[in-house]
Amino acid sequence: MRNVFLVFLVLLLCSCSGTEKEEYEPDIQANDTDPTKNVVMIIIDTMMGSSLDKSMEEGNIPALEFLVNNGQYYKDLVVPFPSMSVTVESTLVTGEMADKHRVPGLSWYDQQSDRVVNYGSTVPFWVRNGFSEGIFDVFYRLNNEHLSKDVSTVFEELERRGHTSGSINALIYRGSHRHELNMPPLTKELTDLPSSINTRGPDILAFGQFEKPGILKRKQFSDGVFHRLGLHDKYTVEVTQELIEENIQPDFMLLFLPDNDKKIINTGLITDGALKLRKVIFKTF
């Protein structure tokens, strides 16, 4: 969940139409500004410019290289401080810094409740302080209490303007629609949390096994106990692809790919999950 540096890509992707091209060579003009196209924002956790450049030199990220060549690649961005996922995502989603959106870091002291809030920086911390508090902070308080109500999220703003939106595995997703996060049996054994937690999100919300878009509830995804309950890159890509193929992609969709965080620190290369985006990206053009 650490963000040494985070680069986000705003992609203009149209709804799925036609057949998939075998060589993944979409026919698109770089200056295409069709207002009917949907917008997809992809956050690749801990994606550094140096790693992106290195991977492009190796020639192993054709999808991202295509976006760089047909879009804008800015190398002078400065990450919000502190560079942690929840703080960075809150800034991206609200357009405000931490002093306004009020999510100051991955771990912080809450004077009002006289306790340390921790969104999962380390397992030992949750063991010492109780899984229930930590999980409830992530699943409810983060979006419904800690993220300031004095700022609007992109999901809330789009709703006011008559547009639909969605969030796939992103931590910050506050919107105007009621959703229910269902706890798996293992969680019930380890915590005293209720079997479900109500939260507010965009029109379409997918958060691992805990919540799937209604129309996709009968679909099979990589979200079992041995697949980190769906909180990984493959699940994000699977759900996104399904939404596009079912022609229910919202006007704006935020995707979060978390796996890169650990791998990039060790190898300097981008994760396989990010590479698999090529099928989703190229299919939509």
Image (cartoon, rainbow, N blue to C red):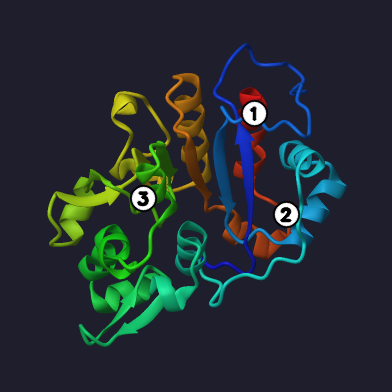
Q: Which residue bears the numbered disc 1?
A: 34
> Nearer the N terminus, badge 3 or badge 1?
1
Near mark 3 (Cα within 10 A), the count class, few <14, some 14-19 or many ≥20, is many
- Residue 18: give x, y in percent of width and height: 62, 11
Q: Which residue bears the numbered disc 3?
A: 156
Q: Nearer the viewer, residue 207 or 228?
A: 207
| Quadrant in the rendering for residue 59 | top right
Q: Quadrant of the C terminus?
A: top right
Q: Secondary structure at mark 3?
A: helix
At a point 51% along the width and 70% down the height, the residue shown is: 84
Left or right of 56 in this view: 82: left
Q: Is residue 202 above or below residue 115?
A: above
- Residue 34: give x, y in percent of width and height: 64, 28
Rounded to the nearest whole Å, what is the CA distance between mark 2 and mark 3?
Answer: 35 Å
Near mark 2 (Cα within 10 A), the count class, few <14, some 14-19 or many ≥20, is many
Q: Closer to the camera: disc 2 or disc 1?
A: 1
> Nearer the N terminus, badge 2 or badge 1?
1
Q: Nearer the viewer, residue 149 or 248?
A: 149
Q: Which residue bears the numbered disc 2?
A: 269
Q: Secondary structure at mark 2?
A: loop
Q: Are marks 3 and 1 in contact (CB under 8 Å)?
A: no
